[in-house]
Amino acid sequence: MQRHQKTATILSVLAMGLGQLYNRQFVKGILLLCVEIMGGYYFVQRLPHAIWGLVTLGDTPTRLVKIGKRYKNVVGDHSVNLLIGGLVILILFSLFVVIYVMNVRDANRTGKLRDQGVTPASFKQTVNYVTDRRFPQLLLTLPAISVLFLTIMPIMMAILLAFTNYSAPEHIPPAKLVDWVGFQTFIDLLQLKTWSHTFYGVFIWTVIWAVIATVTTYFGGLFVALLINQQGIRFKGMWRSIFIIPYAIPQLISLLVMRNLFNGQFGPINQYLGYFGIGKLPWLTDPFWAKVTVILVNMWVGIPVSMVLILGVLTAIPRDMYEAAEVDGATAFQKLRVITLPFVFFATTPILITQFAGNINNFNVIFLLTNGDPVKGDYQYAGSTDLLVTWLYKLTLNNNKYNFASAIGIIIFVIVASLSIWSYRRSRSFKEEDMIQ
């Protein structure tokens, strides 16, 4: 390492901006030095308390103290606020470290250029370079910071809560403190009978629901798309418009209307069944029929999506392939099996995997149609049609079982991510794309 490069690197390690000052980039060096002074002042004051809060989650709860004949509320530590504040400080400190590393690299690179006889860029040249060649990265900075604090930080918060005992009634701040419990929440969820029975029951139904919902909507959409795409079918635009109406209507409205249609007492569907001499069916009040109902309604709102996607694939299949098959004497079924279906499956396999992952987390259909009901007596805060995601919702907002909800959220992520990656890597789409690259 030559003289300027080595000296600038050492100075920038000792203090942010010193390397730039040595390289005669005075404006940049002063700005970086100001960043270090302000950052150092900020983190010296707050970083130790943030680490203490993350490690201990507080040691003094809020309590009432009797002073004479009156009680005074003595504010103590709020465990969740300490956890959130500690995360924010650590993220900010990580950004500060990234800036520090970039400062060292910049000083090293500029010192190397000086050793090669190149004059260092002035502040104006640096600004022009950033606003010209690095303009896309400059614009992406604000969205990236927003994602960091509005998406990544809440995810980290949810993960950390799974390793605490943050739940009602014993550990709800500020009156009670929250403690770290390690994997105890996961152990209770999987082994403690009162929780494991609910978890395994809801988990099995979630998998069954995801498979059936995906298969019915996908192949239902495939069937409708093939019918509309057949030669000799007139008014194809009209048929496409009719079948897309359920998707065009806001799902909230569709599901609430369906909830009234399937009402066991005064719903029109049971009234129509009565006209044909068929007794009323407990569509939403019986565990079995409630599951049948959510599957049927999901087909109503899900088939149009698959139909539109598959119609797009069908129109992209070259007609000369069908003409060549007809010359060879292929039947309609053979053309479907050899040409149409392979093209459709190849193009839509990633979408099929996405639909499966989406159905595992299909909150709207279950919550708006049945609210997870009917109630199941031996379940903890869950009903017969609850999925893991709707059970998580109930645990969080209705029952303040935040640690169990966070653990379930982690399990959902692991399941969805693992199945999606495994399925996609085994698909023909991935294999052929990998071969092309």
Image (cartoon, rainbow, N blue to C red):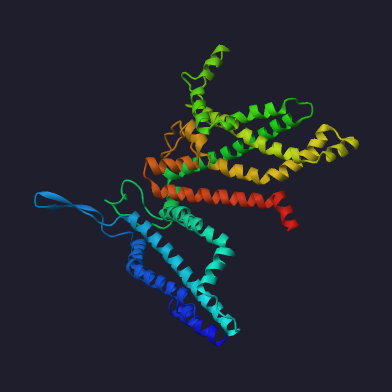
Which of 394 and 349 lies nearest the eye of the viewer? 349
Q: Split into 4 quadrants, where in the image is the C terminus?
A: bottom right
Residue at horizontal 52 percent and vertical 15 percent from the top: 271
Residue 362 x/y as whole percent: 53, 39
Above or below residue 72? Residue 132 is below
Residue at horizontal 57 percent and vertical 60 percent from the top: 136
Whether residue 180 can be seen here: no
Above or below residue 256? Residue 314 is below
Residue at horizontal 74 percent and vertical 32 percent from the top: 229
Whether residue 157 can be seen here: yes
Above or below residue 262? Residue 65 is below
Would you say 335 lies left or right of 360 here?
right
Above or below residue 272? Residue 29 is below
Residue 314 x/y as whole percent: 74, 38
Which of 81 and 295 lies nearest the eye of the viewer? 81
How many marks on residues? Answer: 0
Would you say 75 lies left or right of 437 here?
left
Residue 132 x/y as whole percent: 58, 64
Q: Split into 4 quadrants, where in the image is the N terminus?
A: bottom right
Residue 53 x/y as whole percent: 34, 62
Which of 33 and 90 lies nearest the eye of the viewer? 33
Please, which residue is most extreme toward the front here? 124
Please, which residue is most extreme toward the left here? 68
Which corner quadrant of the image does residue 340 belong to? top right
Which of 362 and 244 lies nearest the eye of the viewer? 244
